[in-house]
């Protein structure tokens, strides 16, 4: 078990393994994304209250759910960096912060698009989820700016790992403290198997497919950027130079 | 060994005393954030409205946000001079647990930068037309909230201590983390104004203070070890 674990920390091993996974992941992502988007944006019947704007939610819910995964991911990567000094964990953490910031931004953007139609406002401070997502974005930007400020990459790795751990705890506290305000956000709708009900299977299955698609998209982009990072950081090692010569 | 062994508590008080002495020798570092706080608060009535009704509404928030900004300014003194003259390395080499030494530094920082601001807050609350029944809650919430700011900010300062200019990155890292304190601090004052008991919010702040006292120095100590090689 420990051999496997220490192998995981080797960038070369990860590069080779992820190279084998990548085509499958990309294929699955394309399939789920196509089904989810076409179904959600073209075929889904209009909601009896929300009309066609409910289609925005198919994307919004999937992206929002995924963007909550970044701080836990960075918590795990940060702990691995601090405890086992794995270079690979830091490479993942670096790109998780950047992707997380993008996902949080897209969540806020799709949320305000939907809100501008349904609530009549692009931004609403009384909604707790909007505010806590905004501050999650700020915390992620803090981690990114700390990394770009520190020049020594080893110091930057450890410092960002520590900040991610502190930030992950903080995101939870912020989320619950912001909920003390009156909240306007929809409570998650209960799912129903009846096709005629407003929350019928056509809605939640489409959402579920989009969630899977967005998670696959996250994995693919994270793997691709980590592979890039590996090539850049290991550019002096023999195997990377062999790889470049081969192609 | 001819050297006398010191106990951890002796080291704790020695660090506390040393930091307080240094702070009182360099009065600028104490006075400037304090003046900044008073000036920022006095700018709000000029920028928003001199009417006391409107000022009453925003008073708690204005005082709280100015406190947060002022603590950002004073935070810079926490480890910088020690890092530059090398005494921070000596601190890391000491045989005593770094947790207590960092805690001592944080406490002395709060005594010279947080406490004066708390003490002057009723005066500024009066100038912002906050009803007098809310003074007690405001002071109490600040008394609990400002040490949390010192403890949280200490982590960010420790992470960035090696950087040349770090005023802004410090604020970018720390200010989002201060949201819960800001929420509970202002909600406590608001609930007193609505003649409800603020005890729930005050106890939550007390919980956050106890959690930060026990965990934040740990993170600061780890951050110092990362920054100082």
Image: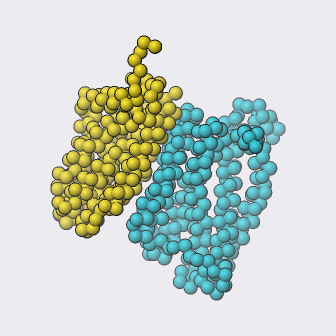
Q: Quadrant of residue A107?
A: bottom right
A121 or B220, which is in the foreground?
B220
Left or right of B209, for residue B49: left
Could you tell me which residue is drawn at 69 percent across and 50 percent down?
A223
Q: Residue at x 52, y 51 (%)?
A: A168
Residue, far bottom: A196
Q: For residue A51, which quarter of the picture?
A: bottom right
Among all residues in the image, which is located at the extreme right? Answer: A246
Picture mark count: 0
Q: Residue at x 30, y 29 (%)?
A: B17
Q: Nearer the viewer, residue B39 or A42?
A: B39
Instruction: Give the residue drawn at x 36%, y 54%.
Output: B205
Q: Which chain is cyan?
A: A
Left/right of residue A71 with respect to residue B194 in the rendered view: right
**Side of B67 relative to B103 (left or right):** left
Does residue A242 appear in this view? yes
* Colour option used: by chain
Residue B160 in the image: above or below residue A173: above
* Image side of residue A7 versus residue B59, left or right: right
Residue B66 in sight here: no
Q: Position of residue A56 (x, y in %)?
A: 58, 72
Where A109 sits versus A235, above or below?
A: below
Residue B133 at what x, y percent from top left? 19, 61
Residue A245: x and y, percent?
Answer: 80, 35
Q: Which chain is yellow?
A: B
x%, y% of residue B218? 47, 39
Q: Is residue B218 above or below residue B135?
A: above
Quarter assignment of residue A103: bottom right
């Amino acid at each position: 078990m420990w051999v496997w674990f220490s192998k995981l920390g080797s960038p070369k091993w990860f590069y080779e393994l992820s190279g084998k996974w990548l085509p499958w992941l990309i294929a699955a992502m394309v399939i789920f994304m196509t089904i989810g988007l076409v179904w959600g944006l073209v075929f889904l019947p209009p909601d009896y209250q929300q009309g066609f704007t409910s289609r925005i939610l198919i994307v919004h819910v999937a992206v929002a759910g995924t963007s909550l995964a970044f701080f836990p991911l960075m918590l795990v990567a940060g702990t691995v960096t601090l405890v086992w000094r794995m270079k690979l964990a830091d490479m993942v953490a670096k790109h998780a912060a950047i992707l997380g910031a993008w996902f949080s931004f897209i969540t806020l953007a799709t949320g305000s698009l939907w809100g501008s139609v349904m609530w009549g406002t692009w931004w609403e401070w009384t909604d707790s989820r909007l505010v806590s997502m905004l501050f999650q974005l700020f915390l992620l930007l803090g981690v990114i700016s700390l990394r770009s400020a520190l020049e020594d990459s080893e110091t930057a790795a450890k410092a960002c790992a520590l900040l991610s751990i502190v930030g992950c705890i903080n995101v939870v506290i912020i989320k619950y403290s912001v909920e003390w305000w009156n909240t306007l956000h929809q409570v998650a709708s209960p799912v129903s198997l009846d096709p005629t009900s407003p929350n019928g299977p056509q809605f939640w299955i489409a959402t579920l497919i989009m969630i899977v698609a967005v998670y696959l998209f996250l994995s693919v982009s994270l793997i691709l950027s980590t592979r890039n990072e590996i090539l850049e950081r290991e550019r002096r090692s023999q195997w990377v130079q062999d790889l470049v010569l081969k192609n | 060994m001819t050297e006398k062994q010191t106990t951890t508590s002796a080291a704790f008080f020695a660090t506390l005393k040393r930091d307080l002495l240094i702070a009182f020798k360099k009065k600028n570092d104490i006075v400037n954030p304090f003046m900044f706080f008073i000036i920022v608060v006095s700018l709000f009535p000029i920028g928003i409205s001199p009417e006391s009704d409107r000022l009453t509404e925003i008073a708690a928030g204005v005082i709280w946000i100015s406190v947060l900004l002022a603590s950002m300014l004073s935070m810079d003194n926490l480890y910088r001079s020690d890092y530059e003259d090398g005494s921070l390395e000596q601190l890391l080499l000491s045989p005593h647990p770094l947790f207590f030494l960092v805690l001592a530094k944080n406490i002395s920082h709060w005594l010279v930068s947080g406490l004066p601001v708390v003490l002057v807050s009723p005066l500024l609350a009066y100038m912002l037309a906050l009803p007098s029944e809310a003074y007690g809650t405001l002071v109490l919430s600040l008394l609990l909230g400002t040490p949390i700011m010192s403890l949280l900010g200490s982590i960010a300062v420790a992470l960035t201590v090696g950087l040349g200019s770090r005023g802004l990155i410090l604020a970018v890292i720390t200010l989002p983390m201060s949201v819960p304190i800001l929420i509970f601090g202002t909600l406590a004052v608001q609930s007193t104004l609505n003649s409800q008991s603020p005890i729930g919010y005050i106890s939550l702040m007390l919980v956050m203070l106890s959690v930060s006292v026990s965990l934040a120095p740990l993170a600061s100590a780890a951050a110092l070890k990362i920054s100082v090689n």
